Amino acid sequence: MPLAPAPDAERALAVEGPYDFDESLRFVPFGVYDPTCRRGPGKLWKAARTPEGPVTLRLAREGGVVSARAWGSGAEWALDRAEALAGLRDDAAGFVVPPGPIGTLARRRRGIRLARSPWVFDGLTEYVLQQRVTFRDAARAHRRLVGGLAAAAPGPPGLLLPLAPSDWLGLSDASLRRAGVDAQRARTLRAAARAARRLGATFGLDPPKACLVLGAVPGCGPWTVQITMGFVLGDPDAVPVGDLHLPHEVGWALAGEPGADDARMLELLEPHRGHRFRVLRLLLAAGRIHLGRAPSGSR
């Protein structure tokens, strides 16, 4: 078996304080079978496009550091942003650990960091695909679309590159329907592709400004904007309203109340303002909530 090619660039990322690599990067791949990303214990491989060209990025927990290696012409660009993707730029200093079950979770899961990805357009497309359908159906559509173009990423381990904005714009309605993407989501995906450059710039914006850019994409309502803010841009205060299951689960987890709606969920999360997504992330890690999908008519 031939040896894997040497990386084009590599870096050791310092880790300060408790850090749970696996849980922090748990939601970077789009499901277990994401052809653009692969995750295993202590390791993450991600293929991506950068302004400098394609890249395969490998992050691994090795001793007291995160080892970052990259292959392809976009290697240096990706490494410059690898700390954020690994969650190592997340600052929870303002999060006051409350008494009760949330405080217990925060102490037990204090190594969780919020990942912030520079590939905002890719992340947004994944959540648009999840509008009004199950995660399984959305992930299957993503695999079919990426596999249909089969653009190979550089270096190991044989990943495929995400679709470029031009790819989304070039896909016919028939191709999208065959992958299971309805006309409404197709329009939103094309709108996002036309706004891809503006979406990429949100990586450097503060959350309120980033929300405005995401919300300006036709078809991206509060659920899509907020879930992208939390899982892609690492906004510690994001709250995805309009989720099919989340309000009920948060109501039960925080107050033992069945049947909570969005208004009640926001009320229960209000004491944690500034870190409401951080609280949701703790509940996710503990299996107390499971983000579902936006119901019909909500985005």
Image (cartoon, rainbow, N blue to C red):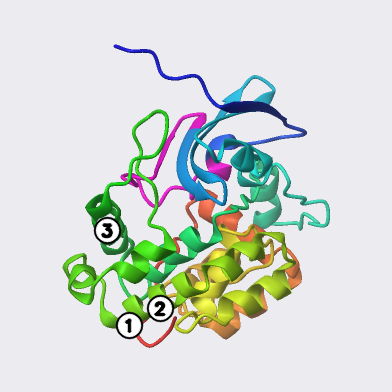
Q: Which image quarter is the C terminus in?
A: bottom left
> Residue 188 shows which numbered tag?
2
Q: Position of residue 63 (x, y in %)?
A: 65, 19
From the viewer's side, name the closer residue of 183 and 21.
183
The range drawn in magenta is: 23-43
Q: Position of residue 103 (x, y in %)?
A: 71, 53
What residue do we see at 41% from left, 18% from top?
4
Q: Please tell me whether mark 1 sits on a helix, a strand or a loop.
A: helix
> Residue 145 shows which numbered tag?
3
Real-space CA distance between mark 2 and mark 1, rounded to the nearest whole angstrom: 7 Å
Among the two numbered marks 3 and 1 on one chain, the one whose residue lies closer to the N terminus? 3
Asked if the residue at tag 3 contacts the one at tag 2, i.e. Cβ–Cβ closer than 8 Å, the answer is no
- Quarter of the figure with residue 198: bottom right
Taking the magenta stretch, the answer to whether it contains residue 35 is yes
Taking the magenta stretch, the answer to whether it contains residue 104 is no
* Residue annotated with mark 1: 184
Q: Is residue 13 left or right of residue 297?
A: right
Q: Is residue 251 left or right of residue 297?
A: right
Amino acid beneath label 2: Thr
Q: Position of residue 2 (x, y in %)?
A: 33, 13
> Residue 67 shows which numbered tag?
none
